[in-house]
Amino acid sequence: MSGEERLSLQEKYAANSICFGCGPANKKGLRIKSYRNNKGLEMEFETSQEHQAFPGVINGGIIGTLLDCHGNWVAAIALMDKLGEENPPCTVTASYNIKLRRPTPANSKLFIQGEVLEIKEKMVKVGLTMKADGKICATGEGVFVAIKEDHPAFHRWE
């Protein structure tokens, strides 16, 4: 990512979201920031003491949340691009899995890459890789779907 100041996709399209993982409006949340790159979306996340499972190692639930929320944004932006829309459709997680490859160090900067593996009409399968200190700590895949107006999460990004 470049050093220039720019809005994340979350800030641009969902500034009022209260999602614990990706909501800019959730002051106690993780507030991830995803950006486009040539492979899909990337993000960086600075871990801190409260993200630990035990001394020096990040909690697996925090890792899962980072990958889940970032994957959801990969899917939403891919569908927006495919449909030629100005705003992403609201998407939710249908399923996701992660593999914790090695302990993820606390007080480190994490780099997460998400890319589309498969895209259909309203469904996107996403692949995710998380690195710390240049080493892969976790990988994952998720299936995310665009939802209709009758779904309780439909207006969450407004």
Image (spheres, helix red, strand yellow):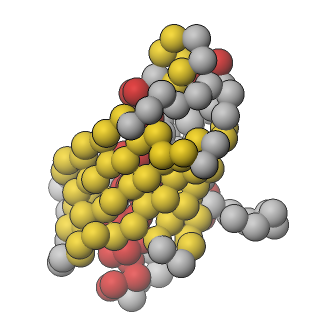
Indicate the position of residue 138 as horizontal and vertical percent values.
41, 42
Residue under the image location 28 percent in, 70 percent down:
117
Horizontal side of residue 113 vs 122, given as left or right = right
Indicate the position of residue 38 as horizontal and vertical percent values.
53, 78
Residue 45 seen by the camera: no
- Which residue occupies the foreground of this view, 12 or 42? 42
Residue pushed farthest top? 54
- Which residue occupies the foreground of this view, 138 or 77? 138
Residue pushed farthest bottom? 84
Depicted 55 relative to depicted 79: above or below: above
Horizontal side of residue 63 vs 134, given as left or right = left
Indicate the position of residue 137 as horizontal and vertical percent values.
47, 40
Q: Quadrant of the N terminus?
A: bottom right
Residue 96 seen by the camera: yes
- Which residue occupies the foreground of this view, 138 or 64? 138
Depicted 49 relative to depicted 116: above or below: above
Residue under the image location 24 percent in, 75 percent down:
119
Indicate the position of residue 102 as horizontal and vertical percent values.
44, 32
